[in-house]
Amino acid sequence: MATLIEAFGVAYSAGDVKVRMLDRTLDGVSKIKYGSKQKKENLYGMGREPVQRGHGNKEYEGSITLKAFEMDAIQKAAKDGDITSIKPFDVVVSYMDADEKLIKTDVIKYVEFTGDVREIKSGDMEIECECELVIGKIVRNT
């Protein structure tokens, strides 16, 4: 039987993740979400049982939530402060171990912002901005 974990009891946590985009490592990322899906369905001929399976296009989705100071820096670099005008870029998500040694990296390719939302409510001690992303491809475990 194969061993799943070489070093017992160690799991990834948010503190083990580094996010790099637009030529800098971001300290103010509180959430990053990315993934892919592909539509698949059974195809039928005569009778009630499927005879083949069809595969549709692959789709990618994602978002990133940034502290206000990170959003301010990105907006300053954008044309007219509009992050949706930034040309496609890559986002590198690196997973590190406790000794800061790289374990794996995912590269989110051809990313663009589709918008940003700042939500501020009474009692908040910080301001965060959630940004939806359009993604061209995800290369995992590079």
Image (cartoon, grey):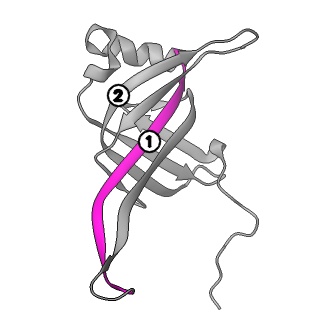
Q: What residue type is labelled 1?
A: Gly
Q: Which amino acid does label 2 sit on?
A: Thr
Q: Which mark is residue 62?
A: 1
Determine if the magenta segment contains residue 60.
Answer: yes
Residue 72 in magenta stretch: no
Residue shown at 42%/15% (left/top)? 73
**128 relative to 31, above or below:** above
Q: How far apart are marks 2 and 1 (CA)?
A: 11 Å
User: Which element carries disc 1, helix, strand or loop?
Assistant: strand
Q: Which residue is drawn at 48% across and 39% down?
A: 19
Q: For this view, does 95 lie left or right of residue 91?
A: right
Q: In the image, is residue 44 above or below residue 85?
A: below
* Percent coordinates x, y for residue 129 in the rendering: 53, 21
Residue beneath disc 2: 114
| Residue density around tag 1, few if under 14, some if 14–19, many if 20 or more, within 10 Å | some
For this rendering, which residue is in front, 46 or 126?
Answer: 46
The magenta region covers 49-68
- The C terminus, quarter of image: bottom left
